[in-house]
Each structure stands twice: as structure tokens, then as C-alpha cells.
Amino acid sequence: MAEIVLVPGFWLGAWAWEEVTPELRAAGHEVHPLTLTGLADRAAEATPDVDVYTHRDDIVRLIEDNGLRDVVLVGHSGANLPVTGAADRIPERIARIVYVDAGPLPGGMALIDFNKPQTQEEWRKQVAEKGDGWQLPVPPFDPAADPDNLADLTSEQLARIVKLATPQPFATATRPLNRPTVLPDVHCSVIASTFTPEQVRMLAASGNAVFEPMAGMDLRHLPTGHWPMFSRPIELASLLDEIAR
């Protein structure tokens, strides 16, 4: 059985894993869902200085303070950089990283850089107009406008996400993560929801610098929207259990 640390993506807190956590505990794992600085029940800690390194250190602190070893470190979506940075910092404690509908970015690349120019422009406008210049507001989670990412979510689930989600400190999206020259040898898995393993391999073969490293990882497919902890929590927990053993 494994020590599993669950790190939510943008706008979410530990509450996002409420349907996944009991399934993993029932399978015998020790599970540690984490709320990152400035979000959810830690929203009062939000400042313009909260960035990807703040969130990396949150993860490192949880693991070290609890004496965890052989950790299966799970990061959803925008948590990809913090979990990567934590594994770079304490590789001796990490058995595996699991990226949920995400993957590691090249060193020196910020999360915002992965998005289309139109999305980058929209984010910066939202931050300037509604986020006091330093917070990315919670998106509307409108399935009519974003059907692929919000696939399989009920109206009740969408309403709960909007109610509990909190603005994201924007420096977590704009500050890149610098990685070591020699990367630690940490096993990695990808649970792809809005893309397929075949697409990863195709993009990697085309020379895409983001997807090239992912092609050599343990690739799993859980077809649903971008938020499988809500839309497919039982299936997601089952995959995490399988990977962790």
C-alpha cells in the first residue's frame, strides 16, 4: 500500500478529492489531500507573491513534516508544475508522479505559456479587470462554452464547483519552474482524460517539446472531461490504486 498525496489544480482545494479519497483509503492506502496556499480553506493566505514555488514548498512541507516516503504524488491539471518541482526537490521521497490530464512542462516554461495566445490574453484581461491585478478569477464553468473540458459533469456538480472554487494567485501561472540540469530519475504516469495516449505519441513524434517526455511515461486513458475527480471519481481512484501498487 502507498502513501498518496493528492494535489488539486487551479481554483480547487483538498475538497476536490472528496469522492476519490475514501475509495483509495478503502483500498488500504494512506491518502493526503492537500490545499495549496491561497486557495479554498487557505484563501486568506493569498497574496500577489504566491507562486509556483510557494505551492512546490507546500507539497515538500507536507511530505517532510509527515515523514512520508515512497510517495505517489498526484497532480491534477495546473498542479503539474508544483508536483514536478517537489519531486525535483526531494526525489528520494517520491516513488512516482501521476499527472492527471496534464504532464510535466520543460524547465523555464510557465503554465500560461502552454495555453493558446487567445487564452493567455483572456486570462491577463480577467486578472486586470476582475482579479485586482494578481488573481485569476474562477471561470464560469459553462458547459455550453466549454463542452469538452466539462464533459460528464452534472448541473449539480458544476454548481458546487463554482460555489467552492476560489480565485487562483496568478503568479502560479506566470512564473516558470526552473528544473535541474540533470533531472532526477522519478517514475511518472499520465492519466489522460481530454486527450489520448495515441495523441501524446503523435505529438511527441512531431517534435513537440511538451509531449516528447510524456511519450515515454506510463500512459493511461480515462475518457471524460478535464475534471475526472468529479465526473469519474470511482474510475480515477481505481486507476490510482492500480498505479500505486
Image (spheres, rainbow, N blue to C red):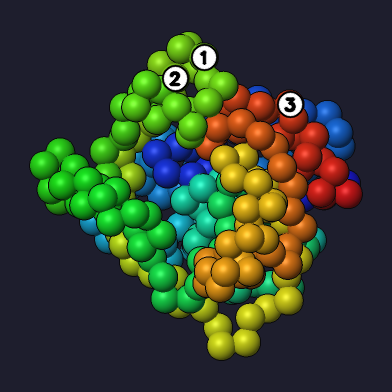
Is residue 18 shown to the viewer in this render?
no
Instruction: Give residue 194's position: percent from left, percent from top.
Output: 57, 40
Seen from the viewer's position, the closer of residues 176 and 12 is 176
Seen from the viewer's position, the closer of residues 8 and 1 is 8
At a point 60% along the width and 25% down the height, the residue shown is: 231
- Name the secondary structure under disc 1: loop
Distance from disc 1 to disc 2, alpha carbons, whole Å, reads 6 Å
**Circle 1 is placed at which residue position?**
154
The kind of residue tagged 2 is: Leu
At a point 51% along the width and 52% down the height, the residue shown is: 79
Label 3 Cα crowd, 10 Å radius (few <14 / some 14-19 / many 20+): some
Tell me where residue 63 sits by quadrant: bottom right
Of callouts 3 and 1, the N-terminal one:
1
Instruction: Give residue 1's position: percent from left, percent from top.
Output: 88, 47
The kind of residue tagged 3 is: Ile
At a point 74% along the width and 30% down the height, the residue shown is: 235
Horizontal side, residue 143 vs residue 72: left or right: left
Horizontal side, residue 176 vs residue 241: left or right: left
CB under 8 Å between discs 2 and 3? no
The kind of residue tagged 1 is: Thr
**Circle 3 is placed at which residue position?**
234
Label 2 Cα crowd, 10 Å radius (few <14 / some 14-19 / many 20+): some
**Circle 2 is placed at which residue position?**
158
